[in-house]
Amino acid sequence: MIVVGGGIIGLTTAVVLAEAGRRVRVWAREPAERTTSAVAGGLWWPYRIEPEPLVGAWALESLAVYEELAQRPQETGVRLVDGVHRGARLDELGAWAARVPALRAVADGLAARLPVIDMPAHLAWLRDRLVKAGGEVEVREVTDLAAVPAAVVVNCAGLGARSLVPDPAVRPVRGQLVVVENPGITTWLTCVDHSAAASTYVIPQPYGLILGGTAEEDDWSLEPDPATAAAIVGRCAAVRPEIAAARVLDHRVGLRPARDAVRLERRPLPDGRALVHNYGHGGAGVTVAWGCARQAAGLAFPAA
């Protein structure tokens, strides 16, 4: 079987399938370190993804995996980190929130100890785990799902599904980040309005402090905008003043694969072979990766 797409969704799905004994190849247009997944801030939290009832189950299933992986942070790139979602309220969240360990109301929002994933390190670890399970990864662009030579094809192409399926319901939501030297911040902080184009978040990673961000609908530009970067630093420095003097290390841009609802379903190809779609995860691919991967694997090989 072949999994199309080598970001967090594609690699996680391939790992689940390979460890279930399936012969899996991943065909990806570019290496994992160049995907949108590699740019992501890496904080576990359902963000800009629908439908919420399904998302909650996928997210909680993934949370359990990340909590286990966080016992080996140097190997997996996953750590549990304390922080606050400023302005968030429990009564505004779905039923899933009641099952997040130690998620609690505090004076300025919701506090929790959540997984923070070093995405470049985690993607490399996933790829290695896949290979150890007998899987393969090949940089190879797919232009026609029906032409992929496998009895089962799993489409995890993310934003690429817009032209590959084709599915015009998939659209980009541009995210720009700034990475700075960490002045000693050990907790994450978010001040996010899910309907706004600008937000404020601070996420400590081993390689620096991630500052965000933006959520610009239908914007395809991958070039960092200097004015946007300055605004991001300014917003983050307003909540953590020590950030103002931090040296900038990098600018990053990624295009989230947004859709009104995640597409996770099985469909026949014209010749009767199986096609499983697993795309449209918006800004929460890492948050739901394991839950969606297990459901996709079940769709690819349904129980008799």
Image (spheres, rainbow, N blue to C red):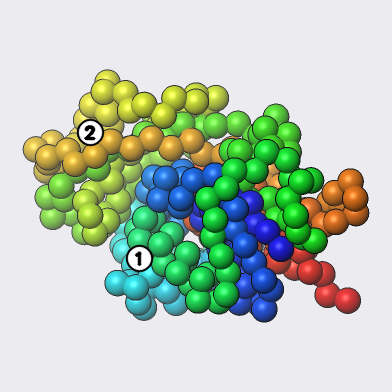
Q: Quadrant of residue 14?
A: bottom right
Instruction: Kindly identify the amino acid type of the residue bearing the numbered disc 1.
Output: Gly
Residue 173 pos. (x, y %):
51, 32
Q: Nearer the viewer, residue 154 or 204?
A: 154
Residue 28 pos. (x, y %):
56, 50
The residue lying at 65 percent from left, 57 percent from top is 3
- Label 2 and label 1: CA atoms lie apart by 25 Å
The residue lying at 80 percent from left, 61 percent from top is 151
Instruction: Kindly identify the amino acid type of the residue bearing the numbered disc 2.
Output: Val
Placement of 215 over or under 131, stated as above or below = above
Residue matched to label 2? 233
- Image check: 138 left or right of 196? right
Q: Quadrant of residue 211?
A: top left
- Image check: 137 left or right of 225? right
SS class of the residue under badge 2? helix
Mark sitting earlier along the chain (2/1): 1
Q: Nearer the viewer, residue 275 or 213?
A: 275
- Image check: 44 left or right of 164? left
> Tag 2: Cα neighbours inside 10 Å, few (<14), some, or many (≥20)?
many
Assess whether mark 1 and mark 2 are in contact (beta carbons under 8 angstroms). no
Q: Nearer the viewer, residue 283 or 154?
A: 154
Q: Is residue 302 visible?
A: yes
Residue matched to label 1? 77
